[in-house]
Amino acid sequence: MGFYVWMKQAGEGCGYSIGCGERLVPVEGETVQEATNEAHRVFEYHGFGSHEECQPQECKLMQEVADLMPEVVKHVDRHQEAKHNEEKAAKLKQLERLKRELGVV
Protein backbone atom coordinates (compact mmCIF):
# COMPACT_ATOMS: atom_id res chain seq x y z
CA MET A 1 0.00 0.00 0.00
CA GLY A 2 1.23 3.47 -0.80
CA PHE A 3 1.49 6.68 1.17
CA TYR A 4 0.42 10.18 0.20
CA VAL A 5 1.09 13.62 1.63
CA TRP A 6 -1.89 15.97 1.52
CA MET A 7 -0.92 19.61 1.89
CA LYS A 8 -3.22 22.63 2.14
CA GLN A 9 -1.90 26.15 2.16
CA ALA A 10 -3.43 28.85 4.35
CA GLY A 11 -6.02 31.12 2.78
CA GLU A 12 -8.20 30.52 -0.20
CA GLY A 13 -5.44 29.80 -2.69
CA CYS A 14 -5.73 31.41 -6.09
CA GLY A 15 -8.98 33.13 -6.95
CA TYR A 16 -11.22 30.79 -4.97
CA SER A 17 -10.64 27.93 -7.44
CA ILE A 18 -11.70 24.54 -6.14
CA GLY A 19 -8.67 22.63 -4.91
CA CYS A 20 -6.26 25.49 -5.50
CA GLY A 21 -3.66 25.54 -2.75
CA GLU A 22 -4.05 21.82 -2.13
CA ARG A 23 -1.78 18.99 -3.25
CA LEU A 24 -1.92 15.23 -2.91
CA VAL A 25 1.53 13.80 -3.58
CA PRO A 26 2.53 10.12 -3.51
CA VAL A 27 5.58 9.38 -1.35
CA GLU A 28 7.85 6.37 -1.15
CA GLY A 29 8.16 4.32 2.00
CA GLU A 30 7.34 0.97 3.49
CA THR A 31 6.60 2.39 6.93
CA VAL A 32 5.04 5.56 8.31
CA GLN A 33 8.49 6.76 9.39
CA GLU A 34 10.00 6.18 5.95
CA ALA A 35 7.09 7.99 4.31
CA THR A 36 7.39 10.85 6.80
CA ASN A 37 11.08 11.20 5.99
CA GLU A 38 10.25 11.29 2.28
CA ALA A 39 7.55 13.91 2.97
CA HIS A 40 10.26 16.40 3.93
CA ARG A 41 11.58 16.19 0.37
CA VAL A 42 8.04 16.86 -0.90
CA PHE A 43 7.81 19.98 1.29
CA GLU A 44 11.08 21.27 -0.17
CA TYR A 45 10.18 20.44 -3.77
CA HIS A 46 6.81 22.20 -3.58
CA GLY A 47 8.08 25.08 -1.45
CA PHE A 48 5.56 24.25 1.25
CA GLY A 49 6.08 26.78 4.05
CA SER A 50 9.08 28.47 2.42
CA HIS A 51 7.21 31.31 0.66
CA GLU A 52 4.93 33.95 2.11
CA GLU A 53 2.11 32.90 -0.24
CA CYS A 54 2.54 29.18 0.47
CA GLN A 55 2.14 28.97 4.24
CA PRO A 56 0.84 25.63 5.49
CA GLN A 57 -2.59 25.33 7.06
CA GLU A 58 -2.90 21.54 7.13
CA CYS A 59 -0.72 18.60 6.21
CA LYS A 60 -1.50 14.92 6.58
CA LEU A 61 0.21 11.67 5.76
CA MET A 62 -2.32 9.25 4.31
CA GLN A 63 -1.99 5.56 3.67
CA GLU A 64 -3.74 3.84 0.81
CA VAL A 65 -6.07 1.27 2.31
CA ALA A 66 -7.74 -0.08 -0.81
CA ASP A 67 -8.00 0.47 -4.53
CA LEU A 68 -11.58 1.58 -5.15
CA MET A 69 -11.38 1.55 -8.95
CA PRO A 70 -13.14 -1.85 -9.20
CA GLU A 71 -16.04 -0.36 -7.22
CA VAL A 72 -16.08 2.71 -9.47
CA VAL A 73 -16.27 0.45 -12.53
CA LYS A 74 -19.21 -1.47 -11.02
CA HIS A 75 -20.94 1.82 -10.15
CA VAL A 76 -20.51 3.18 -13.69
CA ASP A 77 -21.66 -0.13 -15.21
CA ARG A 78 -24.83 -0.13 -13.07
CA HIS A 79 -25.65 3.42 -14.13
CA GLN A 80 -25.02 2.69 -17.80
CA GLU A 81 -27.21 -0.43 -17.61
CA ALA A 82 -29.99 1.49 -15.88
CA LYS A 83 -29.79 4.24 -18.51
CA HIS A 84 -29.87 1.65 -21.29
CA ASN A 85 -32.91 -0.04 -19.72
CA GLU A 86 -34.72 3.30 -19.36
CA GLU A 87 -34.02 4.18 -22.99
CA LYS A 88 -35.20 0.74 -24.14
CA ALA A 89 -38.40 1.02 -22.09
CA ALA A 90 -39.08 4.48 -23.54
CA LYS A 91 -38.56 3.16 -27.09
CA LEU A 92 -40.85 0.19 -26.46
CA LYS A 93 -43.49 2.52 -25.06
CA GLN A 94 -43.16 4.74 -28.13
CA LEU A 95 -43.35 1.67 -30.42
CA GLU A 96 -46.58 0.52 -28.75
CA ARG A 97 -48.05 4.03 -29.08
CA LEU A 98 -47.14 4.15 -32.80
CA LYS A 99 -48.62 0.69 -33.38
CA ARG A 100 -51.90 1.83 -31.83
CA GLU A 101 -51.90 5.05 -33.86
CA LEU A 102 -51.18 3.24 -37.12
CA GLY A 103 -53.51 0.34 -36.39
CA VAL A 104 -50.76 -2.24 -36.60
CA VAL A 105 -51.36 -5.36 -34.56
Image (cartoon, rainbow, N blue to C red):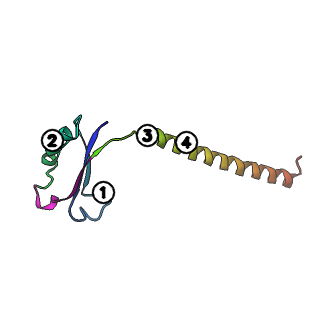
7 is higher (above) or lower (below) than 3: below
Examine the structure image and report whether residue 77 is included in the region drawn in magenta.
no
Give the residue at mark 4.
77
- Point out the stretch of residues depicted in magenta: 50-61
**Inter-mark Cα distance, 3 to 2:** 29 Å
41 is higher (above) or lower (below) than 51: above
Give the residue at mark 3.
69
Residue at the (75%, 48%) spot, across then down: 92
Q: Quadrant of the N terminus?
A: top left
- Identify the amino acid type marked 3: Met
In the rendering, at what x and y percent does residue 35 appear?
20, 40
Give the residue at mark 2.
37
- Answer with mark 3 or mark 4, whichever residue precedes in sequence: 3
In the rendering, at what x and y percent does residue 84 appear?
63, 45
Q: Which residue occupies the foreground of this view, 6 or 29?
A: 29
Give neighbour class at mark 4: few <14, some 14-19, many 20+ (Cα, 10 Å). few
- Identify the amino acid type marked 2: Asn
* Secondary structure under the numbered disc 3 in the rendered image: helix
Examine the structure image and report whether residue 57 is included in the region drawn in magenta.
yes
Circle number at residue 90: none
Taking the image as shown, residue 99 lies to the left or right of residue 37, namely right
- Answer with mark 4 or mark 1, whichever residue precedes in sequence: 1
**Inter-mark Cα distance, 2 to 1:** 25 Å
Taking the image as shown, residue 45 lies to the left or right of residue 98, namely left
Give neighbour class at mark 1: few <14, some 14-19, many 20+ (Cα, 10 Å). few
- Answer with mark 4 or mark 2, whichever residue precedes in sequence: 2
- Identify the amino acid type marked 4: Asp
Residue at the (11%, 57%) spot, across then down: 51
Circle number at residue 19: 1
In the rendering, at what x and y percent does residue 23 appear?
25, 51
* Secondary structure under the numbered disc 1 in the rendered image: loop
